[in-house]
Structure formats: C-alpha cells, structure tokens
Amino acid sequence: MEFPAPLVPGRLIQRYKRFLADVALDEGGTITAHCPNTGSMLGCADPGSRVWLAHAPSPTRKYAYSWELTELADGTRVGINTHRSNALVQEAIDHGRISTLMGYDTIRPEAKYGHESSRIDFLLQGSGKPDCYLEVKNVTAAVTDGIALFPDTVSERGTKHLREMMAMVALGHRAVLVYCVQRGDAHEVRPADRFDPVYGRTLREAIAAGVEAIAWRAVVTPQGVELRTEIPVVCP
C-alpha cells in the first residue's frame, strides 16, 4: 500500500486526549494532528520522536494532518494508523501472499455476526468451503528481543471478538485472527498478559477451540506499508 501523497516529516511534541498530537514540522511551524490509534501506543509516542504525517486538507475535516508513522530511537519505523490494517490484510490476500486464506470467491467487509452485536472485519466465502470469519488486529507494541505484543491496553472489544469467533468454530465455520504487525523489528507476536490478562486467557482458549491465529509483519517506509513476512504467534 503506497501513500497517495508524500508524507510530511516532523518531531512529536506530545500526544494527548488519545486522538490528538502536537507536531513540530521539519518545514517549520507547529500543528495539531489527528491520531488514528486508540491504544496506549506503548513506545511509539515518546516526545521528540521523528514522525510522518499525511496531509489532506478538507473543509469537512477539523484537522488537516493525520499521524501515520513513528521512527524509534533504533531507526525502526512503526505504522501507528490502525485504520490501515484491514486494507493491508486485504491487499495481502488479493496479491496471494497469505496462502492459507486463498481460494475464496468473495470477501465481504464488516459483516454482522454472532450473539453480541459484532461485526467481523471480513467474511470469506467460497463454493464447497466453510465460511471463514476473519478478524484483524493492528500490532505496534513491542518489548525486547523482537517480541511484539497485543493488546497494549485493556481490550474488552478484542476479548468479545474472540468469544464470537469461538462460537463460529463451534457451528462448523472457520475463524482466523490476523495480527497485522506494522513494524519491521518483530519476530513473533505474543498476548500482552501484563496489560490484559483476560484477553490472554481468552486467546489461549480460542486457539484450543480451533480459532486460527496468524501474524504478518510489514515493511514500513515513508512511501508505503506492505505486509510481506509471516511470523509466529506464541502463547507460552
């Protein structure tokens, strides 16, 4: 996925109120940008970090800039825009990179399902195949040794989705959880038990019940983001 226009570089001053960030632009001046990430952004929102913003002025938008990337102290770039993850996964499926999700005739986004008023990110359907309920989670948090973590804060919604997916498997369908890892330094994904132990327990239950959990790592540059490499999901 290429960005439709060149990103604007700057330095993060502060992130606040979850959805806002003040940035000093390289070209001069300070602006307030929209932050399209509701998580804690652990390690990705340190003041002084180099960041890149999308600039899309519009009379219908309050903030003309949106935060897209952060560069960490070691040079790793992280895609922080959680709204990109579904498009990245669909692009990878469309280009045949995720072989375990090939062979379906249709991919329907945002399909209603389950008993808890949920929507699945994608419903894959094909002749002679069980329906595949596909949920995507964006991963930006990491600790040492290349271990990426999800979630980076309590995620009741994520736990609900796991319950719904287990119910689909019990009905004879297929359910797949894809962790979209928007950082190039991760070698595996683990549940962040210290942030949300309930999610961690439920993920283990879901995998034991037949929910498939896979992770794909992206190459992240100021020109674009692309999922290229599958990495393991580890639940010690």
Image (cartoon, rainbow, N blue to C red):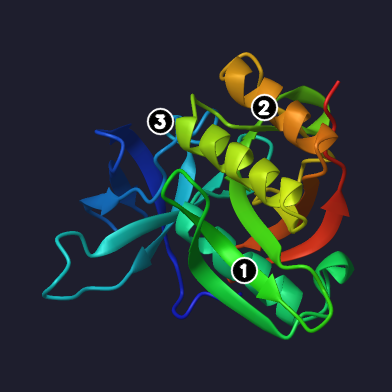
The answer to whether marks 1 and 3 mark residues whose Cβ atoms lie closer than 8 Å is no
Label drawn at residue 151: none
The residue positioned 77% from the left and 28% from the top of the image is 204
Report the front residue among 138 and 210.
210
Label drawn at residue 47: 3
Image quadrant where residue 93 sits: bottom right
Q: In which quadrant of the rendered image does the N terminus lie?
A: bottom right
Residue 76 visible in the shown view: no
Report the front residue among 79 and 138.
138
Q: Which amino acid does label 3 sit on?
A: Pro
Residue 62 image position (x, y, % from top left): 14, 60
Q: Which amino acid does label 2 sit on?
A: Thr
Which of pointers 3 and 2 indicates the residue nearer the eye?
Answer: 2
The residue positioned 40% from the left and 30% from the top of the image is 47
Left or right of 6: which side holds 35? left
Q: Distance between the residues labelled 1 and 2?
A: 22 Å
Residue 215 image position (x, y, % from top left): 77, 49
Residue carrying label 2: 202
